[in-house]
Image (tube, rainbow, N blue to C red):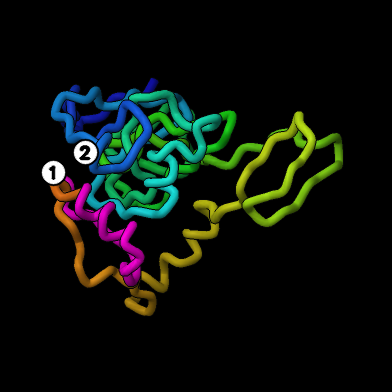
Amino acid sequence: MGTSTPVNIPSKMKAWVYGQHGKPEDVLKLEFEVDVPDVNDDQVLIKVLAASLNPIDFKRMGGSFKATDSPLPTVAGYDVAGVVVRVGSKVKEIKVGDEVYGDIHEQAHHPKDCGSLAEYTAVDEKSSRGIKAVKEGGRVVTIWPAGPVVPPIFVFVVTSTGFVLSKLNPYIEEGKLKPVIDPKGPFPFSNAIEAFSHLQSGRAIGKVAINPIP
C-alpha cells in the first residue's frame, strides 16, 4: 500500500465512468462518489489537473478491444497531467509534490486500474513490463490491424515510455516545445462528452484537452 503523506486525500472523487460498451453519449456517466484508487507498492497517486483524449479512448469504450479491456465499470482516459500526492513504498524516482505527465499504459495482462478522467488516478512508476511472446528469442512485428496470427500469442503495442518523455522536459520548461491544443478547448471537466464528440468528428486540430479537473 502507499506510504502515508500529509496531503489531505479524500476517500471519494468525481470521475467519468462507463459500465458497458457503447457510444460516449450513451454510456459515459459523471459519477460523484467513486472510490479514490488505492496505491500499490510500485504505484503513485496523481491529483489530476488536466487530461486529453485519443481515438483509443472511444474505441475501447465502444468495445473494439473487449478481450483486453479493464473490468467494467471503469474510468475513461489515458493521457494525464497532475501532481503526485502519494507514493508506494517501492517507488524510487518519484516523490510527493512532483509534477508529472504521460499516459496510463494498458496491456493485455495488466489493464489500467483507473483512467485519467477523474480527480485522482493511480499509475505504475514504471509501466513497461516484459512478457514472453511466440517463443524464446522469437518475435512478430506487424502494423495494426494485423492479419490472422495463429494463437496462442500476446499482442502488445510499442509506445513511448516515461524515460523518453523525460527527455522532452528541458524543452518544455524553456518554452521551446509547446503542445498544440485544439482551439475549441480546453473543455471543462463537466463537458467531457462534448469533447469526445468533437474528437470523433474528425475536425480536431491538436490535442483535445480537458482542464480544469475539479
Q: Are marks 1 and 2 in contact (CB under 8 Å)?
A: yes
Q: Amino acid at mark 1?
A: Pro
Crowd tier of the residue under label 1, counting other residues whose Cα lies within 10 Å: few below 14, some 14–19, many 20 or above: some
Question: Residue 200: x percent and y percent?
Answer: 33, 57
Query: Which region is colored magenta?
Result: 193-214
Residue 67 spot, x, y in % from top left: 55, 30
Residue at the location (27% across, 34% down)? 27
The residue under the point 15% across, 50% down is 191
Task: Work out whether 16 lies above or below 183.
Answer: above
Task: Compute the Cα span from label 1 to label 2.
Answer: 6 Å
Q: Secondary structure at mark 2?
A: loop
Q: Is residue 24 visible?
A: yes
Q: Which mark is residue 119?
A: 2
Q: Upstream in the sequence, badge 1 or badge 2? A: 2
For residue 53, side relative to residue 47 (left or right): right
Q: Residue at x 43, y 40 (%)?
A: 60
Q: Quadrant of residue 55?
A: bottom left
In the rendered image, residue 188, in percent from the top left (x then y), is placed at: 14, 53
User: Is 76 included in the stretch rendered in magenta?
Assistant: no
Q: Which residue is mark 1?
A: 214
Q: Residues within 10 Å of mark 2 (few under 14, many from 20)?
A: many
Q: Is residue 7 above or below residue 1?
A: below
**Magenta-drawn stretch contains 194:** yes
At which x and y percent is residue 168? 46, 67
Label 2 is placed on what type of residue?
Glu
